[in-house]
Image (cartoon, rainbow, N blue to C red):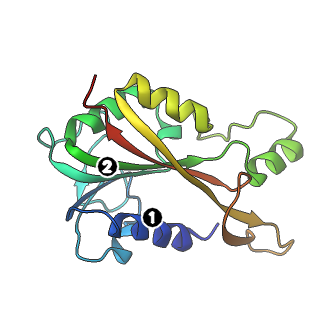
Amino acid sequence: MNEDIRAKYIANQINKLDGRLVLDIGCNSRLVEKYLVNKVYVGVDVLHNPTVIANVISLPFKDKSFKIINLSEVLEHLRSPMSALIEIKRVLADDGLLLLDVPNPYGVEYVFEWFLRKNSLKSCDHLSLFGINEIFNLSERCGMKCEYLCTRFVTLPTFTRNKGMTISVSSRFGGYNYFMLRKDNHE
């Protein structure tokens, strides 16, 4: 899949939000940073080239430090997703927003993989799979309100050497589910 297309989409969502300071957890190659406008970027990862090397379970920031946090394609790799969301909630400002996306287990790519491999939908590095309801339930258990944004990005096989052609469309069969989470200040 073309990661550049996804990074532009995520940055576009962040650019619409109030607040300048952005925490990008699991920033990998910091591709989202390239498309941000008038934002101060802090990238966190355990590998690659982050601004800060840290684990999402133990972030080295003060409480309520960030108004905007991005968690893209991270939750499914964690042994304790709930612990991660609780720690993110700690560093999220009371009026802050967490943008979260996870692979869609019902997306075209996963279904094809399941049929071709004839085994589980879990890829070797995904410890969990999250449908829309699972994210809502997990968010609620962590004391956060969740809003489903969309399911996007369908990668069509091209039957050539490259991995396929990515189309940016909203579809229940897309490759990624996008959410926006807020602190539930009424808990």
User: Residue 97 bears which disc, if any?
Assistant: 2
Query: In terms of sequence position, does the residue under pointer 1 or pointer 2 come before the other?
Result: 1
Which residue type carries mark 1? Answer: Ile
| Residues packed near mark 2 inside 10 Å, few (<14), some (14 to 19) or many (20 plus) | many
Front-lying residue, 65 or 43: 65
Q: Secondary structure at mark 1?
A: helix
What residue is disc 1 on? 10
Quadrant in which the C terminus is drawn: top left
Residue drawn at x 23%, y 70% is 39
Residue 110 drawn at (x, y percent): 75, 47
115 up-or-down from 84: above or below = below
Give the alpha-carbon distance from disc 1 to disc 2, as whole Å: 13 Å
Which residue type carries mark 2? Answer: Leu
Residue 61 drawn at (x, y percent): 15, 43
| Residues packed near mark 1 inside 10 Å, few (<14), some (14 to 19) or many (20 plus) | many
128 relative position to 107: left or right: left
Residue drawn at x 37%, y 58% is 27
Residue drawn at x 66%, y 55% is 175
